[in-house]
């Protein structure tokens, strides 16, 4: 855990702050993010008047805090040693930093240990901090964040106390009480956490580098990505047969199948009323067992029944626990010790002897008091949350004690062992002793065959034997039940004996040696060109015959099928691709917004491209400078795994400056090859490094691959249709990046060459990117140039084509959340490129007054000499596009930069010049 502060605190001492502490916003990073690769929760806090009050100025604060949470004394903080936080408290640190440590300690006390945290001051906002901390369960982390701020507030003197906005973090009931809040956290951990079996499987998968995705609020887990994924729910796997589960659930049918296969099982019958049970008992003879036909976890099971009264009690208990059919099994009682044998994929993995719940007398305490004492063992919890379950004194305990003339109020003699139940299930408070190394080969083979006969890939065999080290064919005993979804906790942490790694064989069964758990992830980021690059790459990969999942600004695609339309450049869409069971390779366009909102959807990329950085989206979410933006986008190449490749733009100084953060090896791409190649890049290729460069020549030159000291011609730039015969230089750059990514992924050059030669910048292949329509007597280009850098790149194409057209018309806009100067720059550049301008703005002005975007665009155009008579301000997108179409005459060039690409393209191709709308002068918007 570490804390860093930026900027001086001196100004705080001269300010008069009167506002209380306030929560401004919260966020959850579910993957690698700007501040860390560890998933974290972020709480932005304005300390208000507390900015002037570090801990060393608040009398008694630190002592009271450490008394309430003594575990904080272990926190190393920036000193990275025990007691480091205490030293920081003494020296004086700010309360946002204190809250960070409190929330980590609270989660640990609740049962989910986490240790990573950061507190960062927000640049340009004195007293405002991002408090960030790791979490295991999102709901638990959020509630712990609220409790931490409540605790800080509770420890402040009255004149400094007060905190606003806590409900932005999590809801909580009642006045603040630390013990009550801790209990709330513990309950939330029990509700939202994994059970021991699921946790063991998740931990093993993560140790092997297999991605883990939780699919619901329970225990349904996806292990792996795409077509390599496997699913589990506790110890039920995606390979577990439904027929086998249903067979195991019908205990009478199970016995029939096992008996028919020569496996020793107790004789028994199924009865529906108590009188039928009594008649069956006469035939089977005592001692007997009663249990529900479809029960589990030992619920409703009564063993060692020796008379009719006990039989009536046992029948009633079984009937009460029956799930569907109200049928009860009455069967012979196998005398001996109760064992659970775990079989995975037809192999014996572990054996545990289960000991019924019991207490040992001290000559003073009652049985109830002894039970309470046993339940204080921290290893015991409710249900399956911990390795052992708390003992509950219920009707079955009363009945069993009554067999020996005891009650819960009896006082056993010192050292006397009192068994509380006949059954030994851990779910009723039993304990386990590991017997894996002691089982007789005959018994092991019987258990193994039982699982195979039922057909379960993961099975828990309930096995009764007087001595597990001797064959039951000699001693008597056999298989009592076969269980689907067996619990692992008795094997993971037995009360006695060696723990067994039972999760490993399950994961090895699902992911045998040589089987992959991940699909290759190829990620693309940058300010401009992401969509075209991602689509080009998908096009190449489709030529290899694999199923490609793509996220882009136009939606999520699997192969060429649009499965989810809309802007799909964030982590939610990436997860959609990674969850798809048909996807073999993922191409993920990765935009700024999703990274800021919740981080990345993947922990590692195989190949990642950092295309460029330009001024866009500045002043939003703490990204105030273009260098801030470069830092954020560098996160994508930072996640490239060892052995992977980071593809980076050699022509962009800001991209080059982030090379040290890139993972794997670096492949550079550049438009300056041949004699223009920089010396440092030439050294790189001469040392065997990879680079894809454009070398000068006609129609945009040639694209060349350097790899392992060899030079290979890939394709003429002009032969790639998307470059418009080499005029679209930005698509030459995108092509270089794509070729580098494909080559790094191992695609043969002949495949790359063939695919690139067939990729066109049509609406069908690359919607909204340099789409050309020539059907109206004038040329229309539809391109999503939504920022100055994008329009400048498009402008190079327009300049190259301009001599062919007598007049150029631009329908231009820019999102309202850009800075005023960015909007004016867009207007200036537009005036330089077009003879006539139609400025528009979207209905969603992103916080600006209606008409302000158009006014700023107009100001920029007028500043560089554009005539006001050639500027048209149209509010709506469809109306502005229609105006541009009406203005265009035969031979003109019309450029439209849309927000809604599909609607705009449809409007362009459906336009009929003979049914045009009113001239633009009748539909202008007055802007003051």
Image (spheres, grey):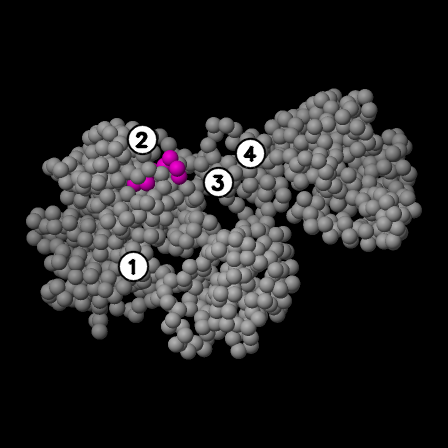
Query: Distance between the Cα atoms at labels 3 and 4?
Result: 12 Å
Kindly state the secondary structure of the residue where label 1 is placed. Answer: loop
> Which is closer to the viewer, label 1 or label 2?
1
Q: Which of the marked residues, 4 or 2, is nearer the chain's N terminus?
A: 4
Q: Which residues are magenta?
A: 641-647
**Rendered location of residue 902, percent (x, y):** 29, 50
Q: Which residue is mark 1?
A: 625
Residue 211: which disc?
A: 3
Q: Are marks 1 and 3 in contact (CB under 8 Å)?
A: no
Is 643 a magenta residue? yes
| Residue 856 screen position, x and y as percent | 22, 67
Is 495 in the magenta?
no
Q: Which residue is mark 2?
A: 747
Could you tell me which residue is drawn at 24 percent across and 40 percent down? 669
Of pointers 1 and 2, the one earlier in the residue sequence: 1
Horizontal and vertical percent position of residue 524: 33, 44
Q: Cα distance, mark 1 to mark 2?
A: 37 Å
Left or right, 203 with respect to 646, comes to right
**Residue that badge 4 annotates:** 507
Mark 1 and mark 2 residues within 8 Å of each other at the beta carbon: no
């Amino acid at each position: 855990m570490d804390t860093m502060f930026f900027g001086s605190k001196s100004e705080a001492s001269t300010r008069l702050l009167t506002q209380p502490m306030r929560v401004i916003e919260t966020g959850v990073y579910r993957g690698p993010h700007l501040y860390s690769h560890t998933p974290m929760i972020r709480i932005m806090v304005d300390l208000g008047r507390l900015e002037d009050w570090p801990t060393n100025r608040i009398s008694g604060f630190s002592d009271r805090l450490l008394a309430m949470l003594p575990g904080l004394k272990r926190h190393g903080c920036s000193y990275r040693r025990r007691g480091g936080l205490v030293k920081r408290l003494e020296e004086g640190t700010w309360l946002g930093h204190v809250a960070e440590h409190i929330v980590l300690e609270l989660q640990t006390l609740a049962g989910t240990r986490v240790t990573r945290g950061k507190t960062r001051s927000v640049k340009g906002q004195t007293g405002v901090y991002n408090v960030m901390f790791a979490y295991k369960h999102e709901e638990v982390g959020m509630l712990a964040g609220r409790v931490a701020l409540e605790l800080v507030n509770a420890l402040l003197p009255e004149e400094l106390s007060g905190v606003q906005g806590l409900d932005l973090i999590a809801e909580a009931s009642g006045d603040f009480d630390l013990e009550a809040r801790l209990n709330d956290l513990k309950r939330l951990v029990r509700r939202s956490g994994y059970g021991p079996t699921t946790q063991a499987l998740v931990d093993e998968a993560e140790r092997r580098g297999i991605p883990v995705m939780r699919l619901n609020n329970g225990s349904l887990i996806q292990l792996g990505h795409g077509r390599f994924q496997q699913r589990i729910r506790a110890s039920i796997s995606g390979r577990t047969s439904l027929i086998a589960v249903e067979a195991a659930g019908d205990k009478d049918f199970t016995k029939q199948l096992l008996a028919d296969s020569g496996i020793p099982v107790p004789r028994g019958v199924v009865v529906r009323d108590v009188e039928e049970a009594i008649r069956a008992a006469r035939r089977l003879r005592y001692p007997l067992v009663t249990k529900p036909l479809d029960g589990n976890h030992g619920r409703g099971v009564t063993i060692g029944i020796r008379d009719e009264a006990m039989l009536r009690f046992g029948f009633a208990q079984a009937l009460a626990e029956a799930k569907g059919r109200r049928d009860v099994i009455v069967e012979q009682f196998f005398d001996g010790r109760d064992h659970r044998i775990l079989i995975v994929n037809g192999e014996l993995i572990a054996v545990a002897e289960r000991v019924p719940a019991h207490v040992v007398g001290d000559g003073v305490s009652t049985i109830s008091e002894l039970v309470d004492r046993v339940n204080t063992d921290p290893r015991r919890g409710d249900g399956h949350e911990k390795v052992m379950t708390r003992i509950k004194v219920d009707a079955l305990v009363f009945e069993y004690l009554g067999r020996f003339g005891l009650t819960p109020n009896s006082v056993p003699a010192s050292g006397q062992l009192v068994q509380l139940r006949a059954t030994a299930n851990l779910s009723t408070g039993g304990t386990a002793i590991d017997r894996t190394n002691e089982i007789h080969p005959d018994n092991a083979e019987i258990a193994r065959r039982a699982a195979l006969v039922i057909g379960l890939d993961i099975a828990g065999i309930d096995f009764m034997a007087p001595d597990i080290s001797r064959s039951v064919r000699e001693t008597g005993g056999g298989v009592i039940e076969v269980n689907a979804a067996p619990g692992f906790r008795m094997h993971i942490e037995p009360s006695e004996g060696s723990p067994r790694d039972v999760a490993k064989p399950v994961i090895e069964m699902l992911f045998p040696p040589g089987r992959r758990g991940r699909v290759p992830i190829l990620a693309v980021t940058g300010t401009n060109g992401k969509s075209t690059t991602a689509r080009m790459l998908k096009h190449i990969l489709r030529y290899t015959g694999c199923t490609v999942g793509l996220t882009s600004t136009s939606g999520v695609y699997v192969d060429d099928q649009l499965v989810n339309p809309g802007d799909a450049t964030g982590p939610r869409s990436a997860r959609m691709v990674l969850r798809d069971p048909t996807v073999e390779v993922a191409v993920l366009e990765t935009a700024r917004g999703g990274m800021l909102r919740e981080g990345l959807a993947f922990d590692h990329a195989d190949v990642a491209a950092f295309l460029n950085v330009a001024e866009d989206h500045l002043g939003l979410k703490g990204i105030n400078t273009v260098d801030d933006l470069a830092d954020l986008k560098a996160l994508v190449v930072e996640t490239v795994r060892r052995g992977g490749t980071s593809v980076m733009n050699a022509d962009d100084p800001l991209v080059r400056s982030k090379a040290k953060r890139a993972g794997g090896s670096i492949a550079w791409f550049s438009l300056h090859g041949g004699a223009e190649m920089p010396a440092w890049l030439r050294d790189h290729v001469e040392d065997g490094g990879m680079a894809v460069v454009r070398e000068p020549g006609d129609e945009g030159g040639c694209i060349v691959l350097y790899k392992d000291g060899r030079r290979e011609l890939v394709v003429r730039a002009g032969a790639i249709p998307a470059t418009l015969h080499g005029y679209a230089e930005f698509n030459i750059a995108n092509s270089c990046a794509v070729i580098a990514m494909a080559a790094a992924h191992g695609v043969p050059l002949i495949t790359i060459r063939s695919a690139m030669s067939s990729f066109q910048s049509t609406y069908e292949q690359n919607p909204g990117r340099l789409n050309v329509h020539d059907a109206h007597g004038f040329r229309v280009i539809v391109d999503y140039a939504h920022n100055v850098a994008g329009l400048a790149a498009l402008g190079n194409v327009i300049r190259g084509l301009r001599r062919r057209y007598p007049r150029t018309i631009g329908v231009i806009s820019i999102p309202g959340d850009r800075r005023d100067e960015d909007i004016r720059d867009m207007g200036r550049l537009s005036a330089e490129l077009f003879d006539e301008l139609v400025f528009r703005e979207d209905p969603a002005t992103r916080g600006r007054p209606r008409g302000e975007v158009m006014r700023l665009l107009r100001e920029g155009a007028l500043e560089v000499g554009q005539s006001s008579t050639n500027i048209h301000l149209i509010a709506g997108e469809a109306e502005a596009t229609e105006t541009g179409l009406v203005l265009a005459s035969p031979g003109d060039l019309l450029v439209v930069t849309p927000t809604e690409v599909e609607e705009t393209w449809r409007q362009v191709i459906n336009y009929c010049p003979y049914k045009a709308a009113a001239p633009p002068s009748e539909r202008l918007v007055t802007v003051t």
